[in-house]
Image: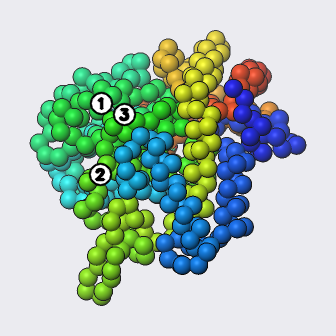
Amino acid sequence: MNNKYDFQILSAPNNGHVYLDSAATSLTPKCVTDKIDEYYNCYNANIHRGIHDWAEQATEEYEGVRPVVRKFIGANQDKEIVFTSGTTHGINTIANCFCADWTIKDTVILSEAEHHANIVPWQQLKVRQGLTIEVIPLLPDGRLNLNQLHTVIQQVEGRCIISMSVLPNATGITLDYRQVSEVARDYGATVLFDGAQSVPRVKTDVSYCDFLVFSGHKIYGPTGVGILYARDGFLDEMPPYMGGGDMIKSVRFDHTTYNDMPWRYEAGTTNIAGVIGLGAALNWVQNIDIEKIYQHEKEISDYAQKQLNKINRVSVLYPDTEKLGLVVFTVNEAQSSDVATLLNTQGIAVRSGYLCAEPILVNQVGRGVLRASFGIYTTQNDIDRFINALNKVMTVL
Ligand SMILES: Cc1ncc(COP(=O)(O)O)c(C=O)c1O
């Protein structure tokens, strides 16, 4: 698979660049940037408000993305699809609305491998009202300790939500999400899946969860837009996250009647161009076929991990476990930021540091790491260039 030709940024004249930072933000194909241009150049108006032609076209294009998302993730109804600013916004919405009145007897269960976006909102809730947070450790191979999940969930007294990333950005090891979902169902717990890294790579089926969140900019779409899937009935009666225009049916100074799902959670002017661009990105992914993307990323990840495992001074995190979309590693006796800086001088873009997942990396590695992450446009040749550059860098560090 080689889709480089769809990405203007990869065919720019200066391009000797190998972009291995797709887990942070994937590149955006030209059909998506064209669709965003079309909004601004042809029907740039606000939605749901005007009755003139441009307003109507903008509304039609915006609302037309809901069924695209619904089909993409296997949801039943358009009203289950809420447009957000991204994964972080989605998780904060659930913590602040679905769990608005949760206290010490109520529990959120996280995994050790969560991104800060799935830790901090729960801590804020804990500080405010005393919610209990439980963290399930990983096994030595980087998979979730399901026995520990059973043990912990049995002891929960009140309400319970399991909130976990399907593909943690600091391990690249897919969660056993079907088993997690089964445990949750057995104990009547709610399931929130963070699909920021999985939705772009694995076929998504929301029948395994009650909430799913993901970001447009990691699935070849624009920044500042994302999706919150909320199973019918789960958020309908909750206090909305933000108040303002569009999320109301009627407002008086002494009372407001809130709008129905999904607009109840889309206060103010949303990222209209972003939503329309996200629709174009999902259509583009759908045309390529998510199963093919999965196969491609699996092959690239296997290849990269094998090559890295061959280098003496390199330590891969969970070196024998299959990865998807990314490989995390360190170089012995070298600072990760130095390695990344020198790789950059050779045109190789990787991420370094704690990857917004400090708890697991502090526990498991004890220092900042490097991460090479892949997209649909990553080729074996890119990995070879990265490995050659890394070998060169190590001669001076
Ligand atoms: C697993 C995971 N969850 C959440 C996020 C946060 O996404 P965003 O910054 O788009 O809200 C990221 C981003 O890297 C991620 O990888």
Is the residue marked 1 within 8 Å of ligand 1, measured from its CB? no
Question: In the displayed structure, does residue 236 sit left or right of residue 245?
Answer: left
Kindly identify the amino acid type of the residue bearing the numbered disc 2.
Asp
- State which mark lies toward you, 1 or 2: 2
Depth order, front residue of 277/60: 60
**Along the polypeptide, which appears first: circle 2 or circle 3?**
3
Q: Sort mark 2 into few (<14), some (14-19) or many (20+) by Cα contacts within 10 Å.
A: some
Residue type indicated by callout 1: Val
Q: Residue at x 44, y 27 (%)?
A: 174
Please, what is the three-letter code of the amino acid marked with disc 3?
A: Glu
| Closer mark to the observer between disc 3 and disc 1 | 1
Residue drawn 13% across the image and 46% down it:
158
Residue visible at 67% across and 56% down? 35
- In this picture, is 85 found above or below 335? below
| Residue linked to disc 2 | 232
Q: If you read the primary sequence from the N terminus, does the residue marked by circle 1 or circle 2 appear first?
A: 1
Q: What x and y, as percent, mark residue 55?
A: 58, 73
Name the foreground residue: 93 vs 389: 93
The residue that mark 1 highlights is 180
Vertical order, 29 against 330 (above or below) = below
Residue 124 sits in quarter:
bottom left
Which secondary structure lies at badge 2?
Answer: loop
Question: On the rendered structure, is 318 left or right of 92?
Answer: right
Residue 133 location, x and y as percent? 26, 44
Q: How much space separates mark 1 and mark 2, taking CA atoms?
A: 21 Å
Q: Residue shown at 20%/54% (left/top)?
A: 102
Q: Give SS at disc 1.
A: helix
Quarter-wise, where is residue 363 in the image?
top left
